[in-house]
Structure formats: C-alpha cells, structure tokens
C-alpha cells in the first residue's frame, strides 16, 4: 500500500462525524465508552463500533482499569490535527458544498460531481 492510500484510509476513518466527535472528546483526555456515549448522546453499542474502527486504524488505544476500559489517542499529534482542522474549517470556510459525488460519470456530465459547482 502506498503512503497516499494509507493516508486516504486514515482520513476516511476519522472523517465519519461520530468518530470525529469521539476524537474531539479524546483530545481532552481518556474516556470510557459510557462517558463518550453520554456526551455524544449515542447508544453505547454505536460508540463501541466506532471505537473499534478507530482502534483498527491505530488512532486510539484502550487500557483496562478495573471494570472499565478507557480509550485515548495513540499519539499527541492526533490531538493537534483535530484542533487544527477545526480551526481551519472556521477560518477558511472550507467544504461548504452540501454534497459532492466523485467519479460518477452521469454526475460529471451534468456538473453535479464538481466540487462547489457554480450553478
């Protein structure tokens, strides 16, 4: 796998809204599934599913403490990435399109597949 393919896989993994919410909470420090589910107002099973995906990509790791499992970021640079990407979104008004469909031939002909089509 090339570095670009690994990078794309990483960005897809963190790009899911619930996972991004989890990561934003983990920037503050380690948390257990119950805490994450409560703050995100999501079912614990859904949060666990997303944590498993983040763990498979080595973005988060877990540590057992008595009866609870706590999750934290694997690298402090991930926290900086989350913080910086949020600041970029606010400051540069990035990604304001409602929906973009890449690679679909019929959309490309009609202009729907373009990034921020003019009209």
Image (cartoon, rainbow, N blue to C red):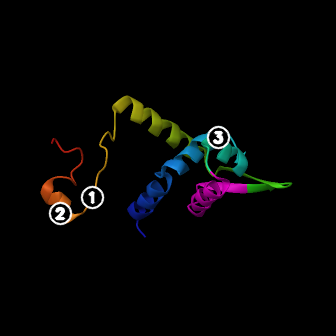
Image point 59% across, 64% down: which residue? 56
Q: Where in the figure is residue 4, as x and y percent of width and height?
A: 38, 61
Image point 51% across, 41% down: which residue? 82
Q: Quadrant of residue 63?
A: bottom right
**Circle 2/circle 1 CB separation < 8 Å:** no
Secondary structure at numbered mark 1: loop
The residues tagged by marks 3 and 1 sit, at their Cα atoms, a distance apart of: 33 Å
Query: What is the total number of numbered labels drawn onto the structure image?
Result: 3
Magenta-colored stretch includes residue 1: no
- Residue wearing tag 1: 102
Q: Where in the figure is residue 115, as x and y percent of width and height?
A: 24, 48
- Crowding at dot 3, Cα within 10 Å, few <14 / some 14-19 / many 20+, comes out as few
The N terminus - image quarter: bottom left
- Residue wearing tag 3: 39
Q: Which residues are magenta?
A: 43-62
- Crowding at dot 1, Cα within 10 Å, few <14 / some 14-19 / many 20+, comes out as few
Mark closer to the chain start, 2 or 3: 3
Helix, strand or loop for the magenta stretch, by majority: helix
- Residue wearing tag 2: 106
The answer to whether residue 109 is above or below residue 25 is below
Q: Is residue 30 left or right of residue 91?
A: right
Q: Residue furthest right?
A: 66
Q: Where in the figure is residue 59, as x and y percent of width and height?
A: 58, 55
Which of the two residues, 24 or 41, is positioned nearer the viewer here? 41
Image point 67% across, 43% down: which residue? 38
Q: Is residue 18 left or right of residue 37?
A: left
Q: Quadrant of residue 26?
A: top right
Q: Residue furthest left?
A: 109
Secondary structure at numbered mark 2: helix
For marks 2 and 1, give the one nearer the viewer.
2
The C terminus - image quarter: top left
The residues tagged by marks 2 and 3 sit, at their Cα atoms, a distance apart of: 41 Å
């Amino acid at each position: 796998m090339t570095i670009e393919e690994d990078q794309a896989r990483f960005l897809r993994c963190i790009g899911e809204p619930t996972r991004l919410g989890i990561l934003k909470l983990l920037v503050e420090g380690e948390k257990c599934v119950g805490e994450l589910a409560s703050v995100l107002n999501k079912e614990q099973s859904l949060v666990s599913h997303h944590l498993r995906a983040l763990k498979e990509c080595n973005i988060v790791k877990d540590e057992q403490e008595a009866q609870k499992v706590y999750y934290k970021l694997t690298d402090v640079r991930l926290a900086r990435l989350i913080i910086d990407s949020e600041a970029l979104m606010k400051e540069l008004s990035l990604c304001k399109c409602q929906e973009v469909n890449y690679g679909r031939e019929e959309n490309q002909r009609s202009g729907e597949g373009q990034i921020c089509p003019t009209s």
